[in-house]
Amino acid sequence: MTEESKVANLFDLTGKTVVVTGAASGIGVGIAEVAAEAGALVVIVDREQGAAEHQAQALIDAGGKAAALHIDLADEASVVDGCREIVARHGTPWGLVNNAGVQDRELLLESTTAEWDRTLTINARGPYLTTRELGRAMVAGGNGGRIVNIASVALLGGLIKGHAAYASSKTALIGLTRASALELIEHRITVNLVLPGGVATPGAIHATGPLVDGPARRPPPLGLNEPRDIGAAVLFFLTPAAARVTNQSLAVEAGWALT
């Protein structure tokens, strides 16, 4: 039995750098916490610099390793420059978690192209850009890597009214996951998808738009997810435990589909 195959090491990220977008709040906090507890140096990427620095310090105070960096996913130059800075400061990252997203609501027949473009830009184009830039670094580094995209249980029917743009943006991540998994597999870089169910995050609670109505309102049998529940699924894909898993999706929806 090799050292890597021992159970104690299957979920170990010691010595690895993991970049998590949108990690200053919500689901991203849970992902960052779990990755840091597994030994990774977590780079918290967010458009809110102060919040990112606060969260990085919280991980450090808890005994982990973390850094913060401002990137605006809606700005290509910000993504390109930020990814270059990550590599310069911390070396080639092992993992990238495309978590950042927006989810405000507009009913389809009352919707605007402005909201459509904003949502698709952040939720779909942003992960494309970070995957492109840090994927290049991973290929150049020659040591493999892990990319995890955070979509939504909306792709399995967990919809609410007003999410035409949101659901479309998350559906785009299926295509991005499949295409990038195919192109990066020869470099030992895996790409997988996590589909969170309901999580009571600030982004969800304060999202604007019509009253929440639709199938996603059904309470899941196991209760609402916590951010760390999503972090646990992401951890699996980041670690040696998933060394031969790519182009796969994992729903963390607390049994919602059974109701």
Image: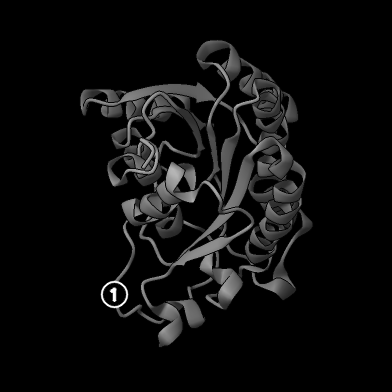
| Residue extending farthest left | 62
Q: Is residue 162 left or right of residue 19?
A: right
Label 1 element class: loop
Identify the residue at horizontal 58%, vertical 64% (top origin). Answer: 105
Between 248 and 241, the one nearer to me in the picture: 241
Compared with 23, 50 (above or below) is: above
The image position of residue 179, as x and y in percent, is 76, 52
Coloured how?
one colour
Label 1: few (<14), some (14–19) or many (≥20) C-alpha neighbours in 10 Å: few
The image quadrant that residue 109 belongs to is bottom right
Q: Amino acid at mark 1?
A: Leu
Q: Is residue 96 above or below residue 109?
A: above
Quarter of the image for residue 256 reads bottom left
Q: Nearer the viewer, residue 188 or 118?
A: 188
Which quadrant of the rendered structure holds the C terminus? bottom left
Q: Position of residue 12 (x, y in %)?
A: 35, 37
Image side of residue 88 versus residue 20, left or right: right
Quarter of the image for the N terminus: give it. Answer: top left
Q: Residue at x 65, y 72 (%)?
A: 107
Query: What residue is drawn where x is 62% and y is 31%?
Result: 72
Rendered location of residue 106, percent (x, y):
63, 66
Does residue 150 appear in the picture of this structure?
A: no
Q: Residue at x 55, y 64 (%)?
A: 209
- Measuring from the top left, give residue 10's x and y in whole percent: 37, 44
Label 1: which residue? Answer: 222
Observer-nearest residue: 4 or 160? Answer: 4
Q: Residue furthest front?
A: 1
* Rendered position, 125 above or below 145: below
